């Protein structure tokens, strides 16, 4: 979460966990309002909510294809997603 104090990011993650939204399947089914309320502490919650939803939809739609990509291809694909910068792409590459 860029431009956000880490304490506020932690609070947003705790809020998402509290309502069960840390799994992609749950995030896909969640309302924009619920996600927005959960991440409000991280700032810019409206745009971040849209980007979280879009990234989750992209991930779910491409999951099988992503598994076979090498790191440079995966990173390139991540960077093509709105709101994903180099640091976030590198972190996500470590977990995918």
Image: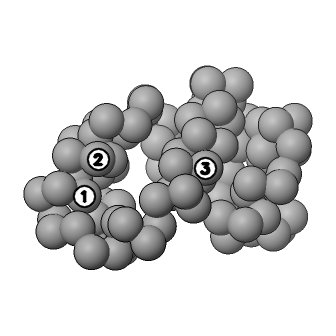
Dot 1: element? helix
Report x, y in % for residue 27.
73, 57
Q: Of the two numbered discs 3 and 2 on the same chain, state the one appearing first in sequence.
A: 3
Along the line of sight, which residue is nearer the eye, 52 or 12?
52
Quadrant of res 49: top right
Depicted 83 relative to depicted 73: above or below: above
Residue in the picture at 28% in, 40% down:
79
Report x, y in % for residue 70.
15, 68
Report x, y in % for residue 20.
81, 69
| CA neighbours of label 1 inside 10 A, class few (<14), some (14 to 19), many (20+) | many
Dots 2 and 1: beta carbons under 8 Å? yes
Q: Which mark is residue 77?
A: 2
Quarter of the picture holding the C terminus: bottom left
Residue in the picture at 82% in, 37% down:
32
Q: Which residue is mark 3?
A: 57
Q: CA distance from mark 3 to mark 1?
A: 16 Å
Q: What is the total number of numbered labels drawn onto the structure image?
A: 3
* Colouring of the image: one colour
Along the line of sight, which residue is nearer the eye, 89 or 62?
62
Side (left or right) of 31 relative to 6: right
Dot 3: element? helix
Q: Which residue is mark 1?
A: 74
Quadrant of res 45: top right
Side (left or right) of 54 relative to 59: right
Observer able to see residue 9? no
């Amino acid at each position: 979460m860029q431009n956000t104090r880490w304490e506020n990011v932690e609070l947003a993650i705790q809020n998402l966990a509290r309502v069960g939204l840390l799994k992609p399947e749950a995030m896909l089914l969640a309302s924009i309002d619920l996600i927005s309320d959960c991440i409000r502490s991280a700032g810019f919650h409206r745009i971040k909510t849209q980007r979280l939803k879009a990234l989750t939809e992209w991930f779910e739609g491409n999951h099988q294809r992503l598994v076979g990509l090498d790191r440079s291809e995966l990173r390139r694909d991540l960077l093509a997603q709105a709101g994903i910068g180099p640091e976030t792409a590198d972190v996500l590459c470590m977990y995918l």
